[in-house]
Amino acid sequence: MKFSPGKSALSFLFSVYFAFPAEASATPQCLTDEMIEEAIGEQVRTSTLIVKTRGLPELPLCSGLTLAQHIQRMRAAAFPEEQQRVEDLRAMVLEREQAAKATAAAEAAAQTAALSRSSIIEDAPINRFFDQPAPATTHKRRKPAAARASPPRSSPRRSSSSRSHYPNCGAVRAAGAAPIRRGQPGYARHLDRDGDGIACE
């Protein structure tokens, strides 16, 4: 076909396109489902593990899927029982993974709670007012006024001590003079921690 000066360029191009319609549409742009079925359909339906795809041109699928995804769909349609078993297996695996995550979260929460309790115990205030360990009774109550006003009891062991000054309650107890009431020899304000008039209770 020759281009004559009397024809426009656009008319010439149209004449070329419609003169060779077979050559213009001979090369496909993507793989259709019919092309894939014709090439590997028989292999998929015979439950072949390895599907040979050498007969297919290296083109993208018109459906937008990958070739492996399309083959998987073809297997699911050909063997629905096998596909159901695969789905059940996936659901079981997912359930086990969720149960394992829940167990791990519960264990982590328990460990956090245990660490929090131990931190509270370690941070509790310690009585450092006395050199000696704290007495066995943890709850001390102030004695009633009648008890404080009662006459002091005589203690043979206290009278045997001639000391009138003690550095701390440990020395008072070692001398057998505890407790010391206000007005008695050896009483000092630094020995009366709660200020009730009775030192080294």
Image: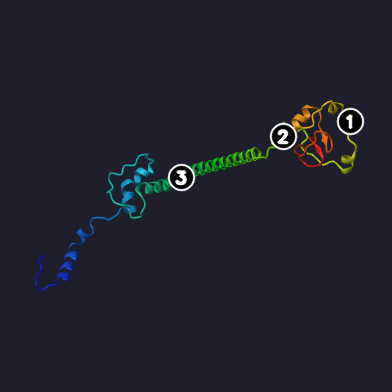
Which numbered disc flags the more N-terminal residue, 3 or 1? 3
Q: Residue 167 in the image: state x and y as whole percent.
A: 73, 32
Please, what is the three-letter code of the amino acid marked with disc 1?
Ser
2 or 3: tag closer to the N-terminus: 3
Q: Nearer the viewer, residue 108 or 192?
A: 192
How far across and down, in percent of the image, does residue 163 sit? 79, 29
Q: Quadrant of the C terminus?
A: top right
User: Which image quarter holds the N terminus?
Assistant: bottom left
* Marks 1 and 2, how far apart at CA: 26 Å
Q: Amino acid at mark 2?
A: Phe
In the picture of the structure, the residue carrying the numbered disc 2 is: 130
Residue 74: image x %, image y %?
A: 39, 48
| Residue at the image point whose x is 84% and y is 28% from the top | 158
Distance, label 2 to label 3, CA atoms, is 78 Å
> What distance separates the C-alpha of mark 3 from that of mark 1?
98 Å
Q: Which residue in the protein does label 1 denote?
A: 154
Q: Which quadrant of the view contains residue 64? A: bottom left
Circle 3: element type: helix
Q: Is residue 199 left or right of residue 105?
A: right
Q: Is residue 191 left or right of residue 52?
A: right
Mark closest to the chain's N terminus, 1 or 2: 2
In this rendered view, identify the residue nearer to me: 188 or 111.
Answer: 188
- Compare residues 138 and 35 and report the one nearer the observer: 138
Residue pointed to by mark 3:
83
Q: Quadrant of residue 149?
A: top right
Q: Residue at x 29, y 54 (%)?
A: 30
Q: Judge depth for marks 1 and 2 and give the one in front.
A: 1
